[in-house]
């Protein structure tokens, strides 16, 4: 082989070694040293609330890309306290998210809160004077809100029921909806009066085949705890029997 040919072979060999070495250096770089792609940050979630009893307000973000904002949740705990006793509890983030989603769904900019956290004592007091207050209400766990919107309230109720995120109560006469993060369930109390309610219960019992005397001759005043529990069990049994026949 001539001198020129040998020189050319050496040059080519050196180039291969250089390229192989260069490739090896790049391939052997640890992944951690490579620049990471920046992920888009989630926009903070905001909510605007007005407490109907205290006149206080909350207007701002309550959740960001890291989760609930501690200072905001503390402010919401104060805003949504039991206004009868002044006691408060940590409000569950899920029920705030539920309300925010409902408001977004109907384009509501603000919600008025009628009831949020209740102590056991407050709940018992309301149960004695208001028909439909549950003994083990989600309110006593900081998982429920009774709210009113300036408009599109019925649409908001329908949107909430469609989300299947918990309990949704509709009170068309009183113009508010109840939201909670308990089991998925729906109910409507139209405020038509105690007599009308008993009449509808009698009709349900009649359809189920159960005796109607459980509501016959009831005094026209709020039921006691024992009577309400008995009535609730009878209604649940009647609803089960009616559904089974359909």
Image (tube, helix red, strand yellow):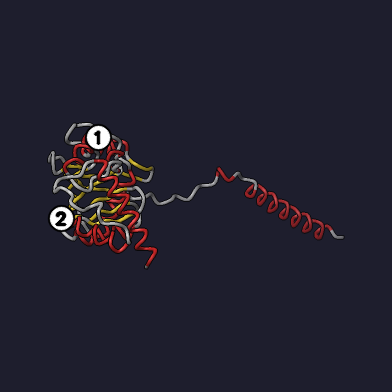
- Can residue 150 be seen here? no
Q: Nearer the viewer, residue 113 or 175?
A: 175
Residues 119 and 196: in front is 196
* Number of other residues with Cα within 10 Å of mark 2, as a class: few under 14, some 14 to 19, many 20 or more: few
Residue furthest to the right: 1
Q: Which residue: 79% across, 58% down?
A: 9
Q: Looking at the image, which is closer to me, 241 or 8?
A: 241
Task: Check disc 1 and report the residue beneath it.
Answer: 119
Residue in the image at 32% along x and 39% along y: 69
Secondary structure beneath dot 2 equals helix
| Residue density around tag 1, few if under 14, some if 14–19, many if 20 or more, within 10 Å | many
| Location of the N terminus (image quadrant) | bottom right
Question: In the image, what residue occupies the spot 29% across and 40% down?
Answer: 142
- Residue 113 is left or right of residue 22, and the answer is left
Residue at 43%, 50% (x, y): give it: 39
Give the distance between the C-alpha atoms of the residues marked 1 and 2, in whole angstroms. 30 Å
For label 2, the residue is 195
User: Under tag 1, what secondary structure?
Assistant: loop
Q: Quarter of the image containing the C terminus?
A: bottom left
Residue 208, x across and y down, in percent = 32, 61
Give coordinates of residue 19: x percent, y percent.
68, 53
Question: Which quadrant of the structure image shows residue 120?
Answer: top left
Using the rendered view, name the quadrant where residue 242 is placed.
bottom left
Residue 21 image offset from top left, x and y in percent: 69, 49
Q: Does residue 10 sit above or below 114 in this rendering?
A: below
For the residues carrying marks 1 and 2, which lies nearer the camera in this image? 2
Q: Is residue 231 left or right of residue 22?
A: left
């Amino acid at each position: 082989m001539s001198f020129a040919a040998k020189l050319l072979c050496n040059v080519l060999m050196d180039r291969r070694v250089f390229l192989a070495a260069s490739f090896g250096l790049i391939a052997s770089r640890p992944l951690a040293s490579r620049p990471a792609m920046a992920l888009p940050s989630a926009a903070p979630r905001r909510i605007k609330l007005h407490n109907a009893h205290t006149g206080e307000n909350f207007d701002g973000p309550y959740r960001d890309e890291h989760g609930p904002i501690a200072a905001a949740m503390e402010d919401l705990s104060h805003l949504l306290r039991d206004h009868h006793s002044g006691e408060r509890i940590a409000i569950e983030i899920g029920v705030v998210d539920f309300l925010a989603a409902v408001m977004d769904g109907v384009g509501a900019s603000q919600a008025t809160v009628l009831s949020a956290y209740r102590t056991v004592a407050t709940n018992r007091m309301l149960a004695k004077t208001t028909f439909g207050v549950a003994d083990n209400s989600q309110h006593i766990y900081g998982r429920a809100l009774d709210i009113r919107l300036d408009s599109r309230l019925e649409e908001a109720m329908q949107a909430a029921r469609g989300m299947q995120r918990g309990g949704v109560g509709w009170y068309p006469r009183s113009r508010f909806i109840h939201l909670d993060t308990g089991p998925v369930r729906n109910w409507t109390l139209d405020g038509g009066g105690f007599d009308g309610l008993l009449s509808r219960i009698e009709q349900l019992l009649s359809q189920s085949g159960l005796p109607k005397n459980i509501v016959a001759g009831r005094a026209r005043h709020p039921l006691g705890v024992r009577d309400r529990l008995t009535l609730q069990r009878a209604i649940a049994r009647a609803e089960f029997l009616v559904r089974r026949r359909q």
